[in-house]
Image (tube, coloured by chain):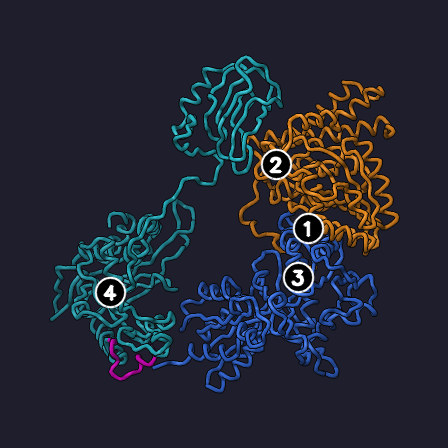
Chain colours: A orange, B blue, C cyan
């Protein structure tokens, strides 16, 4: 079992996960009410992965994510107001309402998307790593993707290229066990992901994605390895999504018992129980953190509600860059 | 014009491309090349020959056969601040990278609200005429021109081969440079300073008042030959080289058609839903009342390009087709 | 929102769903996150959670009911009487529909839906009208040139692709000696104009008045009118102006008639001459017969017909000889006003200047106003400035009440 950090840091981790959970639950509510539209992929259950890994990254590092990236955006420090306004399709959103839930970008925080093509972010992260190396900086690229991407050709091309060219990329596979409704075992001939990685001559490890402390611990070590050895590394975080693939589905592909089983092993429950057992946190602390998270979400919703719509005259703006090189 | 080479000598289109690459590598330390067999092998079409020796492996990067990964790597490196120039061996292989080109490179700037432009150059060989059959002879320039967010250029002359890359680097958008396979050995002299080359306007390659032949890429030479034959019949054709397929410089060809009142579009790409259709429609929208004859097209026949020489020739636009059709549009029958 | 449970939107394509089963009953306490109902969508049956805490007061929709997204399904913590009304006052199409396997469920729409589900059946066209068998092929450029040169395309032989008429064919036709289709040789026309205008300036003591009139109401009227009719039936500003002049001429017959043998003879009808300039120095002013008696729509038809025939050289002799008063319009041109010359033996001519925005003072304030300068040249042997002033005022007043024209 991973050693407990300081009380302050432990509460920080808990707070980050709570912020994500509250944000996601509110998104579900707002989606049902028709305030948020399009596809909405929620991160409930997987918070420990984004929060744990983000602890290992520096402000200058690059991040490439998937369409289930609200949690990463929040953990990276993108203001909730900017995120919620984006989900509302408002001009005040981080992408002026053009991207929506699946396409969160924040250049200042080096958050390069929200990619809605499974596997599409992997080559991009390889390139970010290549760029950092060629620019002579010691930043690394962190690439989050689901295990569904492993079936894509782009996954294998990217693993090989990153390793072949010694690029500083930390790949984080969030293995939540279902690619939409297709179970990992129904998709892969070799279900041991670390064994699969043997072919790419890359340091690879697995970690319990429901344990934020373990994720942070492994992410810190691998990120330092990537940064200093100038080699890619691979971290499989075994996790589980509590909600449906996209907002709602009938969940024909998994049993309710299975979902409940995983919910009991959730990252919030786990950390809370441990902190209480070690007398590092009282119930009041938890309630206070939850209230703060809710207030932050309330503020974001009210900000988004009051936001404006981009003028239709701006429709074609930014199709091409406004500045020349 | 100014700054002509001291000793003007004929060089090939291939050499002109190489000069263009070498010049940007020398001038901009952020420029680097990625591609299959561009280094040790010297380039599938020998365009990059000698560059590895001169600039080293860090800047001339041989890539594995992973088009999606190395095009994506170019996108990421561009986002990180570099100026990657990616070579895809041929347009057919670019289809393996289409996800990165269309879903990522072309969308990021707009989708991120202007935060993330992608200053990436992609070069690729295109076109038929070398008996390499149906998986190496596509002409998909029109296809790519359908995509907002990309800039599409088709150098046909020695000057453009030498200068378009530099001009492309002036933009922070993804630019695809289509080099026609049949042009690599074409010889000519550099007539202008590469710095004067733009990637915004079409060019009138031959002036004439009776009909406008609108084309791009290797078909330019077929049109110029056809124009000479038409001239012998007393018909003076104006030949427009589109040069830039997206954004299309319609002003140049619309003005030409307004003068000549007749337009014949020559496009090696397949006829249906192709670039020629787009050019023809723009003429309808903007110059209909100036037309004295229906707009016509000579395009690639709609088949996978066959291997046998005579069949391949039959599948592509031919000079005599252009001459016959153009003459029938101009000459009066009565 | 709290206290209400509505049919949720469970996906971007969902507009309605069937409430398959209630998992709660009135009196049950529920808390945020509880599954309260099963809803069937196209994807399958989905557990639906509730986002507020409370006690179920009333279930408003029975199991097996197909309802639109947003429909109130249950009320929490009282308020039952009010919520009953919500359903009763709902639009019929949004009211809950029992699910019956035998009959299709009427499509219901969420308020935010943009996807129509109504089936549109294209009309079956049994017979397609064939194009006129004798339609001539004329290139767009040739058609334009023929209009410029006044060439009648019916009389031109086409030599282009598919025997189409090209520009060259039109030019050739215009140059042939007998000039089929051209009403009068241009040089003759010029001579006729020269003689008439010289006589006018020699014999007729002209006086000139002008008045700038607001055209704003007329423009607004035209816009309203034109919005309701086909493109072919739209009115041009000149049509309104002509009608206003024709009415003024009817009201003040001293401007409508001829000066012959040292005496003025008022005309009984108003045949309004319309000056039409043609390429090659030709100018004609054929008449719109009985212009004062025609509706604007009828006048517009006549005007279009006249313009077409003038350009094709097909004028009737009566049209050329009969104008009782002429209007020369520069409404679409870049001139401020026109000081016209009377066409003898008529006794007046009305000039129309450019219709454009000009500074306009209303109650001490300058504003931009769409205006038109109307000028009058009249024969002093028949009328004087006072009458002319009234004549112009009559036209102006008519333009301020265009719907009465």
Query: Is residue C175 magenta-colored?
Result: yes
**Residue that label 3 marks:** B93
Where is residue B69 drawn, in percent x and y?
72, 54
Q: Kindly identify which chain the residue marked by label 3 belongs to.
A: B
Task: Determine the CA span between mark 4 and mark 3.
Answer: 65 Å
Quadrant in which the N terminus of chain A is drawn: top right
Between circles 3 and 1, the one closer to the viewer is 3
Marks 2 and 3: in contact by CB < 8 Å?
no
Specify start and end residues of the magenta stretch as a single range.
Answer: C170-182
Q: Is residue C245 above or below residue A222?
A: below
Mark 4: give few (<14), some (14-19) or many (20+) Cα within 10 Å. Answer: many
**Residue that label 2 marks:** A246
Residue B18 in view (yes/no) = yes
Task: Determine the CA span between mark 3 and mark 1.
Answer: 26 Å
Mark 2: give few (<14), some (14-19) or many (20+) Cα within 10 Å. Answer: some
Work out whether disc 1 and disc 4 sit on a shared chain.
Answer: no
Q: Kindly identify which chain the residue marked by label 4 belongs to.
A: C
Task: Determine the CA span between mark 3 and mark 2.
Answer: 33 Å
Work out whether disc 2 and disc 4 sit on a shared chain.
Answer: no
Q: Kindly identify which chain the residue marked by label 1 belongs to.
A: B
Q: Is residue C124 above or below residue B316?
A: above
Tell me: C10 left or right of B96: left
Q: Nearer the viewer, residue C128 or A110?
A: C128
**Which residue occupies the extreme front position in the image?**
A189
Q: Earlier in the sequence, mark 3 or mark 1?
A: 3
Residue at 68% in and 66% down: B167
**Residue that label 4 marks:** C306
Tell me: B316 left or right of C399: right
Between circles 3 and 2, the one closer to the viewer is 3
Q: Secondary structure at mark 2?
A: loop
């Amino acid at each position: 079992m991973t050693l407990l950090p300081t009380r302050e840091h432990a509460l920080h981790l808990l707070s980050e996960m709570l912020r994500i959970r509250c944000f996601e639950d509110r998104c579900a509510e707002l989606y049902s009410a028709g305030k948020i539209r399009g596809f909405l992929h929620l991160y409930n259950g997987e918070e420990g992965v984004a929060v744990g890994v983000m602890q290992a990254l520096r402000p200058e590092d690059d991040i490439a994510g998937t369409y289930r990236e609200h949690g990463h955006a929040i953990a990276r420090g993108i203001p909730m107001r900017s995120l919620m306004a984006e989900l509302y399709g408002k001009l005040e959103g981080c992408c002026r309402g053009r991207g929506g839930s699946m396409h969160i970008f924040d250049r200042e925080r080096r958050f390069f998307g929200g990619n809605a093509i499974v596997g599409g972010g992997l080559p991009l992260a390889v390139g970010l790593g290549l760029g950092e190396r060629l620019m002579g900086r010691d930043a690394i690229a962190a690439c989050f993707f689901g295990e569904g991407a492993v079936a894509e050709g782009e996954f294998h091309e990217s693993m090989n290229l990153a390793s072949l060219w010694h690029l500083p990329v930390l790949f984080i596979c969030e293995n939540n066990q279902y690619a939409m409704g297709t179970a990992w075992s129904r998709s892969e001939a070799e279900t041991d992901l670390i064994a699969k990685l043997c072919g790419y001559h890359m340091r690879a490890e697995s970690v319990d994605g429901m344990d934020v402390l373990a994720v942070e611990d492994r992410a810190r070590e691998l990120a330092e390895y990537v940064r200093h050895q100038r080699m890619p590394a691979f971290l499989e975080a075994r996790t589980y999504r509590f909600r449906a693939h996209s907002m709602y589905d009938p969940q024909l592909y998994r049993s309710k018992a299975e979902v409940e089983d995983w919910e009991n092993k959730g990252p919030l429950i786990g950390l809370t129980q441990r902190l209480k057992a070690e007398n590092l946190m009282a119930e009041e602390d938890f309630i206070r953190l939850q209230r703060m998270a809710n207030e932050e979400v309330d503020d974001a919703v009210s900000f988004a509600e009051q936001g404006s719509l981009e003028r239709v005259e701006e429709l074609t703006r930014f199709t091409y860059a406004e500045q020349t090189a | 014009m100014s700054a002509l080479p001291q000793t003007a000598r004929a060089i090939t289109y291939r050499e002109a491309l190489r000069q263009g690459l070498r010049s940007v590598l020398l001038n901009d330390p952020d420029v680097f090349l990625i591609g299959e067999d561009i280094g040790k092998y010297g380039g599938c079409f020998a365009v990059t020959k000698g560059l590895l020796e001169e600039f080293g492996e860090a800047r001339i990067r041989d890539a594995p056969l992973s088009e999606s990964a190395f095009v994506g790597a170019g996108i990421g490196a561009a986002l990180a601040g570099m100026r990657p120039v990616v070579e895809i061996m041929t347009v057919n292989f670019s289809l393996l990278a289409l996800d990165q080109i269309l879903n990522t490179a072309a969308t990021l700037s707009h989708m991120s609200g202007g935060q993330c432009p992608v200053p990436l150059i992609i070069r690729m060989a295109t076109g038929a005429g070398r008996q390499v059959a149906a998986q190496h002879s596509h002409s998909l320039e029109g296809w790519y021109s359908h995509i907002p967010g990309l800039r599409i250029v088709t150098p046909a002359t020695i000057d453009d081969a030498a200068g378009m890359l530099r001009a492309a680097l002036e933009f922070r958008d993804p630019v695809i440079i289509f080099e026609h396979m049949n042009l690599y050995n074409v010889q000519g002299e550099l007539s202008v300073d590469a710095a004067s080359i733009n990637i915004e306007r079409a060019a009138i390659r031959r002036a004439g008042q009776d009909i406008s032949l609108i084309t791009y890429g290797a078909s330019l030479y077929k049109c110029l030959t056809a124009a000479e034959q038409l001239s012998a019949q007393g018909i003076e054709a104006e030949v427009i080289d589109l040069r830039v397929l997206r954004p299309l410089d319609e002003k140049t060809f619309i003005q030409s058609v307004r003068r000549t009142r007749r337009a014949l579009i020559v496009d090696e790409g397949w006829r249906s839903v192709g670039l020629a259709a787009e050019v023809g429609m723009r003429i309808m929208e903007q110059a209909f009342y100036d037309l004295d004859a229906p707009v016509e097209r000579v395009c690639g026949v709609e088949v996978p390009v066959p291997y046998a020489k005579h069949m391949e020739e039959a599948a592509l636009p031919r000079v005599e087709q252009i001459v016959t059709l153009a003459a029938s549009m101009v000459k009066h029958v009565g | 929102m709290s206290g209400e449970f509505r049919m949720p939107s469970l996906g971007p394509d969902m507009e309605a769903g069937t409430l398959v089963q209630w998992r709660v009953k009135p009196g049950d306490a529920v808390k945020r996150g509880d599954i309260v109902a099963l809803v069937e969508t196209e994807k399958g049956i989905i557990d639906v959670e509730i986002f507020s805490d409370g006690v179920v007061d009333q279930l408003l929709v029975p199991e097996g009911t197909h309802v639109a997204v947003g429909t109130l399904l249950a009320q929490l913590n009282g308020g039952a009487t009010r919520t009953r009304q919500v359903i009763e006052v709902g639009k019929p199409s949004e009211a809950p529909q029992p699910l019956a396997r035998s009959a299709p469920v009427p499509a219901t729409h969420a308020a935010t839906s943009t996807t129509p589900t109504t089936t549109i059946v294209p009309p079956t066209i049994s017979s397609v009208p064939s194009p006129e068998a004798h339609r001539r092929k004329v290139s767009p450029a040739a058609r334009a040139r023929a209009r410029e040169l006044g060439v009648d395309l019916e009389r031109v032989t086409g030599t282009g692709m598919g025997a189409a008429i090209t520009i060259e064919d039109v030019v050739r036709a215009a140059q042939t000696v007998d000039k089929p289709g051209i009403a009068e040789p241009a040089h003759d026309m010029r001579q006729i104009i020269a003689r008439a205008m010289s006589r006018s300036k020699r014999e007729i003591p002209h006086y000139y008045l002008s008045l700038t009139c607001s055209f704003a109401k007329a423009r607004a009227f035209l816009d309203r009118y034109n919005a309701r009719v086909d493109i072919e039936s739209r009115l041009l500003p000149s049509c309104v102006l002509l009608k206003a002049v024709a009415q003024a001429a009817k009201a003040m017959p001293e401007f409508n008639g001829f000066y012959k043998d040292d005496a003025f003879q008022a005309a009984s009808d108003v045949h309004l001459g319309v000056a039409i300039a043609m390429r090659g120095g030709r100018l004609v002013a054929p008449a719109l017969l009985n212009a004062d008696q025609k509706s604007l729509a009828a006048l517009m038809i006549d005007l279009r017909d006249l313009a077409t025939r003038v350009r094709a050289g097909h004028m009737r002799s009566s049209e050329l000889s009969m104008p009782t008063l002429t209007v020369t319009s520069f409404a679409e041109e870049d001139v401020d006003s026109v000081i016209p010359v009377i066409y003898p033996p008529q006794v007046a001519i009305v000039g129309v200047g450019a219709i454009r925005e000009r500074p306009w003072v209303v109650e001490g304030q300058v504003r931009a106003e769409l205006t038109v300068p109307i000028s009058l040249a009249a024969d002093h042997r028949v009328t004087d400035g006072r009458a002319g002033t009234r004549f112009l005022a009559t036209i102006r007043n008519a333009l301020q009440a265009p719907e009465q024209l």
